Amino acid sequence: MQTMEPISGSLRNAVGAELVWQQTKLLKRMYELQSGDVLYATMNWQSSWRSVAEVTAIDGHWTIRRSGFWRQRMVVTDNATGAEIATFTPKWSGNGGTVSFSAERLFTLNRNSMWKGEWTWVTPQETPVLRIKNGWGSSRRARLIVEPEGANIPETSILATLGWYILIAAADETAAVTAASVAAVSG
């Protein structure tokens, strides 16, 4: 897949369109969110061994990273100011969690279907903002659909990229556990 031109679309204007998160290089942790020729966001991990991802969208540049050991969370930092703009706290069950923005706005990531890999960001009133569906059993591709409420909130791009970050991190953890289990059985 070729690398797209600079960011050209706002997710707030993509209501109802089917967008795709896709890995751009086979051995690199680089992803693009696009629909046709329109590029909405990019996400690049700093390295394969770190949990820090740099994100670019039309409405900002930020960094997403894991924080904490026993009580892990994901922190979103604005690259221009260095300020924390959002913190995602996962549920103990591993099925989603809540993100709080510095403006005291909350959104919840809910798992719709365990078997279909569907997730939805919702407002405190349970209004869907956007949906993410892992693609075809792969952690390196997903579909994203912006719901009508997504046009009304400024955090839509952050939710889209944070949701994808969370799904990739979960897939990486599953792969690590599987590899450790295979090594333990083989050893």
Image: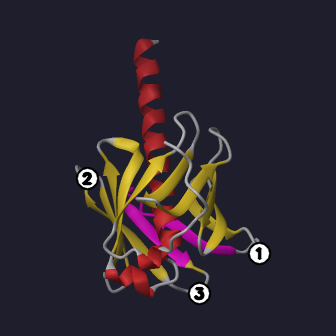
Q: Which amino acid does label 3 sit on?
A: Ala
Report the magenta residues as a range.
Answer: 84-100
Disc 2: which residue: 114
Can residue 67 be seen in this snapshot? no
Q: What element carries label 2?
A: loop
Sequence-first disc among 1 and 3: 1
Count neighbours of disc 2 (C-alpha within 10 A) and say few if under 14, some if 14 to 19, many if 20 or more. few
Count neighbours of disc 1 (C-alpha within 10 A) and say few if under 14, some if 14 to 19, many if 20 or more. few
Of badges 1 and 3, nearer the viewer stands 1
Disc 1: which residue: 81
Q: In the rendering, at what x and y percent does residue 74 appear? A: 57, 61
- Between residue 42 and residue 79, name the one nearer to us: 42
Of badges 1 and 2, nearer the viewer stands 1
Q: In the rendering, at what x and y percent does residue 86 appear? A: 59, 73
Residue ID at (25%, 53%)? 114
Whether the residues at callouts 1 and 2 have beta carbons within 8 Å, the answer is: no
Disc 3: which residue: 103
Sequence-first disc among 3 and 2: 3
Q: What residue type is labelled 2?
A: Met
Which of the 4 image quadrants contains residue 96? bottom left
